[in-house]
Image (cartoon, rainbow, N blue to C red):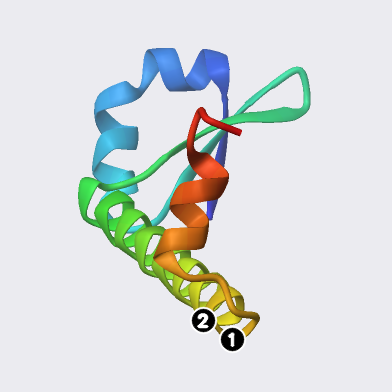
Amino acid sequence: MKYVSATDAKQRLAALLDAAQREPVVIRRQNRDVAVLLSSQEYNRLRALNAAEFQRFCDQIGEAVVARGLTEDKLAEILSDDR
């Protein structure tokens, strides 16, 4: 991973865009990491990974509540405004 200051990033954006195709580039301001420049391919990979992980989580929760007896009718009753 490459690290650059915010000032360097402003001055060398074109070169950093090229570098981000090979590895993430961390932009630092006042000795703190403030942003990461990624290739669009890496960004899309991370988004897909995140979505898949969230789907697995939802599936696990769904299986757990079904195992405890929650049905679609019970859920509809819980979520209805008539309570």
Task: Please state the total of marks drawn on the protein image.
Answer: 2
Which mark is on residue 54?
none
Could you tell me residue 70's position as x and y percent? 55, 71
Left or right side of 7 for 32 = right
Q: Badge 2 is on which residue?
A: 63
The quadrant where residue 3 appears: top right
Left or right side of 63 for 13 = left
Quadrant where the image shows the C terminus: top right
The Cα–Cα distance between marks 1 and 2, rounded to whole angstroms, is: 6 Å
Q: Nearer the viewer, residue 12 or 33?
A: 33
Residue at position x 47%, y 70% from top?
71
Residue at position x 21%, y 55% from top?
41
Looking at this rendering, what residue extends furthest in the front direction?
A: 82
* SS of the residue under disc 1: helix
Which mark is on residue 67?
1
Looking at this rendering, what residue extends furthest in the bottom direction?
A: 67
Q: Is residue 18 above or below residue 7?
A: below
Q: Is residue 64 above or below residue 9?
A: below
* SS of the residue under disc 2: helix
What amino acid type is highlighted by mark number 1?
A: Ala
Kindly check if marks 1 and 2 are in contact, taking CB atoms under 8 A apart as contact: yes
Sort mark 1 into few (<14), some (14-19) or many (20+) by Cα contacts within 10 Å.
few
Could you tell me residue 52's position as x and y percent? 36, 68
The quadrant where residue 72 appears: bottom left
Left or right side of 45 for 83 = right
Residue at position x 59%, y 74% from top?
65
Q: Nearer the viewer, residue 62 or 56?
A: 62
